[in-house]
Image (cartoon, rainbow, N blue to C red):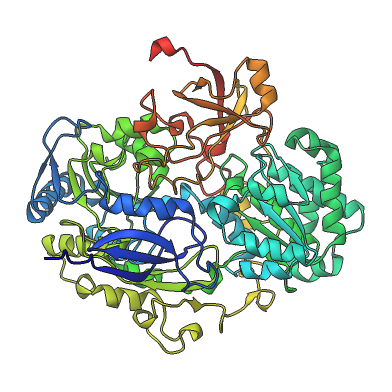
Amino acid sequence: MRNSEPEVSTHSSVCPLDCADTCSLSVEVKDGKIHKVRGGEANPFTGGKVCSKVTTGFPAQVHGPNRLTTPLRLSGSKGSGQYEAISWDAALEEIHQRYKAIISEHGPEAIVPLSYGGPMGLLAGGSMDKRFFNKLGATQVDASTLCAGVSGAAYESVFGDTGGIPYAELSESKLIIVWGNNITVGNLHLIKLLRRARKSGAKLVVIDPKRIRIADEADLHLPIVPGTDVVLAYAVAAELERLGALDDSFIAEHVHGAEAYLERARTFSLADAASICGIALADIEEFVGMWANIRPAAISIGVAPERNRNGGGGIRAAFALPVLTGNIGMPGAGVCDVSGFFPIQHDVLEQSSLIPEGTREISVLDIPSKILSPGDGVPIKSVFIYNHNPVAVHPRQAHMQEALLSENLFVVGSDITMTDSMIYADIILPAASHFEYGDLYKAYGHHYLQRSEAVIDPVGDALPNTELFRRLASKFGFEEACFSHSDEALMNAAIKPDVAALDGRLAVDISTEGAIDMTVGSRGTLLRGATPDTPSGKIELFSEALEQDCGEGLPQYRPLETAFRFVLVSPSSDKRTNSTFGGVADHDRDISVEMNPDDAVILGLSDGQQVRIFNDQAEVVMPLSVSDKVRCSTLYVPKGAWIKDSETGQTINALIPGHKADIAGGACYNDTTVDVEAWDTTRG
């Protein structure tokens, strides 16, 4: 008798990772398992191409040996990794009883959700979970301080919540600035737009401490010292003023605070910028000439410039360049920002009206300190980790580990796999992968809305976030109707049905074989049907609101005080997204430290040698990669490694400081300073 052929089917899906492109996927399922993942054709922006980490990472993550398939209870000491399998009902009941006891003694604010940028779907990332913690009265947590919060606050201070131009419009630009955005790793599909624009005569400038791959195609690469963006932008603005290259009529009509801004800018000469930013004077002069003579000009700014003590100021100063030169409003001119095209009803999704009045809000960065040293405030007695791997992502890794090991802290975790953070949990709940449920996806690198459906059944006893928190709400006796809403109802609540781009459809009716162009019928972009939503009604180069809040009415430059030789930059990896896929075989192959050849010669180090990277907080060991793509005195280590890949039991996150950016309290990953020396292998 012949063996039956395996059942094979192909389905459309969406990549859920924290990446600008939110690619459409084509998923081949064989015998009920994810077999192959390729780029899908549903999204015209991503058009059938997808990064290699997705194609190799997802099948291994979903069906690999680290997959969590049943609820677990800690059976050994904290951090031991010793667990026993239990039922869902037993797990939820234990959470219920422990939370009741915590609330009785300390109040609901002693319970803290610890969530960040896992799956980016609107349902998985902020719907039933938010409703549960809001109704519970748990501490509210601002997770934007880990990433993008500074950039968002900077954008809002200058332009309000009025959106910028879609990335697709870069094909009409004649000058394109890619500033701190490693698009070949985290914004891949932008490359084709840049190449198309360059074929039409556009000039491309890349500003990055490293000569990233797209910089090899650029007309100009400015290898800036991390944290000095504000100086470069100020000096360029002042020189443009001296040359008479500012758009005075545009400034008079549309800009608030230009004179105060330019007065500060005049304190930085091009020579100052060359010295402080570590860029050749001739290259800065060429950059000035481009701004003075080429229109329309557009900027794509990544999150890298926000990841330092001057983060908000640097981004605001970069925004000022298209503003002062009048590169706002015309086709192909402005700042790439697609947030205005997605009218998401977050308050409805999250049911924010459930939050008890006066509930405290804290930064996600402060959670470890508040666990270990609560002071006079409500102590944190439980954290619920989901959509997040904080041990692998947060600054001051050892501080996070110490906090999670606290014997009086009840830790609940939910994840797809056993991560560096899950091993600190008292109760672990198996989470469904995004292939096992449907969701709705906006993007931050294009203007298309997409919907996905489940392509396989849940693996083992895994549950999606919506069902997990629906069951918890029932266990806690929450009777509001919103806790019985189906995933379809949540999807329809995410976006208003009268949005023109939906053409009368509900969100749940969006075809998984296509994507919705959200520019259709939108309210318009900045100065194209939409005015700046700022206190003055104009673009604000001086912000009274920031001046009152933190004394940052104008961007400021603060030198980095350090006794160490190098600045360590930890950008996106081409093997991992944040820490996702860190536990997958072969996704650790980029874990090395890149160093400029001149620095290696001075230290007597050679390519491939094991080196010790250290500061006052920690030490990490990894191979050295000598590369002229990295500027002198700057090291480059991709983020997201897991502890299993470390000889010292710590990753580079253990080296990252705990101080915060100038606005919005952002993490300062790129203010990490270290020394390097040969690793004494006898210590191993």
Q: Is residue 310 left or right of residue 437?
A: right
| 154 w.r.t. 570: above or below | below
Q: Residue furthest bottom?
A: 504
Q: Is residue 90 left or right of residue 530?
A: left
Which image quadrant is residue 426 in?
A: top left
Q: Is residue 446 left or right of residue 682?
A: right
Q: Camera-side residue: 286 or 664?
A: 286
Residue 256 visible here = no
Tag count: 0
| 520 w.r.t. 209: above or below | below
Q: Camera-side residue: 258 or 194?
A: 194
Q: Position of residue 192 (x, y in %)?
A: 64, 63
Q: Position of residue 388 (x, y in %)?
A: 35, 48
Q: Camera-side residue: 553 or 304?
A: 304
Residue 598 visible here = yes
Q: Camera-side residue: 554 or 1?
A: 1
Q: Position of residue 603 (x, y in %)?
A: 63, 16
Report the residue at 59% width, 39% height from top.
309
| 337 w.r.t. 269: above or below | below
The N terminus sits in image quarter: bottom left
Report the residue at 62% width, 22% height from top.
565
Report the residue at 56% width, 20% height from top.
676
Q: Position of residue 12 (x, y in %)?
A: 38, 71
The C terminus sits in image quarter: top left
